[in-house]
Image (cartoon, rainbow, N blue to C red):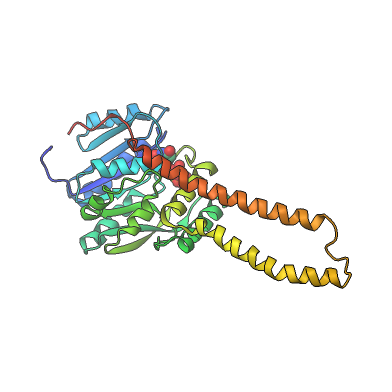
Amino acid sequence: MADQRIISSIIAPIFNEIESIPELYRRICATMDKVGDPWELILVDDGCTDGSTGKILELAEKDQRVRPLIFARNFGHQIAVTAGWDYARGDAVIIIDADLQDPPEVIPELIAKWKEGYEVVYAVRSEREGETWFKKITASIFYRLIYRITDVKIPMDTGDFRLLDRKVVNVLKTMRERHRFPRGMAAWVGFKQVGVAYKRAVRFAGQTKYPFKKMLKLALNAITGFSYFPLQLASYFGFISAGVSIIAIPVMIILRLTGSQAFSGQASTLIAVLFLGGVQLISLGILGEYIGRLYDEAKGRPLYIIRNAPED
Ligand code: UDP
Ligand code: MG
């Protein structure tokens, strides 16, 4: 088994999904056995605290095709996906959510496109079942905002559910950025890409592991990782307010000379000061986001820490 060539590696990042794991395994086995090529399932335990680790190890014990990768703590979904890339041995690498929102039955469609010669096959969410309106609206704004302001055209309504050719994975493995946005990275590398539509299902069990705070962090990673636009905002604001004052200065002089009382109180001064103070603080905050990321890169810590790696 160990020296058998693996065609498809499936990576599932797991953060407290104890109820979904057996069903995920069952549905992946059923689907992949139909495809027929040798495959492996990499279950990345992203610091689970609900006993999922035991379930993962139990499956790996029973089935050689299941390879467990146990993190020392929670590093986040994107890092778990990255570790999966590092350990995957297949010619095609498929990333799938462990909560079964991405139906494993779509994998053969991804593989079919890959066999046609596409190197990145991403799954596009044509419908999302059973998600709150808040999640749907924030997700929709997120995809559109990212599409507009980043320099790479990241496909809209597309999550991490996708197939990557070995060539693509080898490139992605060299990109060790800390604050990562894997779907942006997969778009950035180029290659022959194609989308396949699918219906995003309801969560099999448990709650979403992406509270608003994590979504915001991901959005910031996506924007800072692929665009300088926020940094340039400060200059745009600077030009606009300098432009306004160049017009305002002669107007004020004329008003004063003609004895007008317009703009005589303190309120107008105060508003201008508060407005500019606000803009400056926001610009500083934006600078901080980029500098903090630079600082993290400079520290050069490992992206993740592994407690247990697969044996072979
Ligand atoms: N996940 C993870 N680490 C985290 C958060 C999430 O590995 O810190 C996994 C989670 O177990 C699931 C996938 O990432 O398999 C997607 O997370 P979730 O379903 O909670 O996100 P949503 O579908 O609600 O956007
Ligand atoms: Mg989910």
Task: Establish if 298 lies above or below 49.
Answer: below
Q: Quadrant of residue 59?
A: top left
Horizontal side of residue 92 vs 178, given as left or right: left
Horizontal side of residue 171 vs 263, given as left or right: left
Residue 116 at least partly seen: yes
Q: Quadrant of residue 226?
A: bottom left
Q: Quadrant of residue 164?
A: bottom left
**Going by the picture, which residue comes out furthest to the left?**
3
Quarter of the image with the C terminus in it: top left
Q: Position of residue 281 (x, y in %)?
A: 61, 48
Task: Establish if 73 lies above or below 153.
Answer: above
Horizontal side of residue 82 vs 288, given as left or right: left
Q: Position of residue 50 (x, y in %)?
A: 42, 28
**Going by the picture, which residue comes out furthest to the front?**
257
| Relative depth, front residue between 281 and 221 | 281
Quarter of the image with the N terminus in it: top left
Task: Establish if 154 lies above or below 71.
Answer: below
| Relative depth, front residue between 231 and 181 | 231
Total marks in image? 0
Q: Position of residue 114 (x, y in %)?
A: 24, 59
Task: Establish if 170 lies above or below 74.
Answer: below
| Relative depth, front residue between 145 and 289 | 289
Q: Position of residue 274 (x, y in %)?
A: 71, 52
Residue 211 at least partly seen: no
| Relative depth, front residue between 227 and 66 | 227
Horizontal side of residue 4 vs 203, given as left or right: left
Residue plotted at (22% across, 47% down)? 33
